[in-house]
Amino acid sequence: MKNIVIFASGTGSNAENIIHYFKNNTSKSVVGVFSNNSNAKVIEKAKKLDVQTVTFNKDELYGDFVLSKLKELNPDLIVLAGFLLKFPEPIIAAFPNKIINIHPALLPKYGGKGMYGNHVHQAVLNNQETETGITIHYVNEHYDEGGIIFQKSVSILDCSTFEEVSKKVQQLEQEYFPQIVDQLLTRNP
């Protein structure tokens, strides 16, 4: 059985989608959802779907607590799905090429510290881009700089608000993120 652990900070729409995608899979399973926000909706959603949850504070993330919990679950892939804190280097070192993130733009554009969610969509609009999209990439010690695994673009010529851009990007996330997670686990026995 391939184990997936998801890290999320907010509502957890991508986490919930990934959990549903693997719910009846006999070879791959989401075994944990970790969050730095004990009030995040993602925790509630994971519990309803019978997935173990772990909440932690910043000190526990950068200390030994989160790393020891991860080692207990022995994930084959760690998926950051709307996780807003910088990922600690000791965890990256312990799970090389096993940590991925989804970014709501076509990296390297609109990446880096502070570039998440609607901040990204507004920046894309402000710069009068004709398209945006998603980037799924490996996580390294720098925000949004790990190797790119997958990108998909979408036209935003008909969008005038960040909410409209967000809706198009979320459709891409919902369609492609679980598939790429599946492909990565299938490719790496």
Image (cartoon, rainbow, N blue to C red):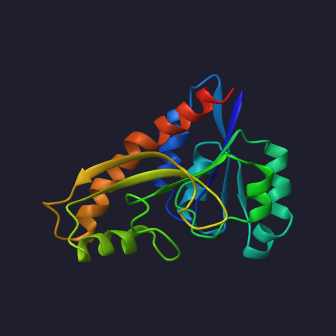
| Residue 7 place in picture, x, y as percent | 63, 56
Task: Indicate the position of residue 187 as horizontal and vertical percent values.
Answer: 60, 28
Would residue 22 be visible to someone looking at this image? Answer: no
Left or right, residue 15 beside residue 38: left
Looking at the image, which residue is at 63% across and 22% down? 26
Which quarter of the figure has residue 50?
top right
135 left or right of 139 in image = left
Is 144 or 17 nearer to us in this picture?
Answer: 144
The quarter in which the N terminus is drawn is top right
Q: Quadrant of the C terminus?
A: top right
Is any atom of residue 112 visible in this view?
yes
Q: Count of labels shown?
A: 0
In this view, the residue farthest toward the top is 26
At x 65% / y 30%, what residue is drawn?
188
- Location of residue 22 with respect to 44 vertically, above or below: above
Figure quadrant of residue 150:
top left
Residue 179 in the image: above or below residue 126: above
Quarter of the image holding residue 24? top right
- 96 vs 109, left or right, is right
Residue 69 at x, y = what percent?
A: 82, 53
* Image location (x, y in percent) of residue 129: 23, 66
Observer-nearest of 105 and 177:
105
72 to the left or right of 151: right
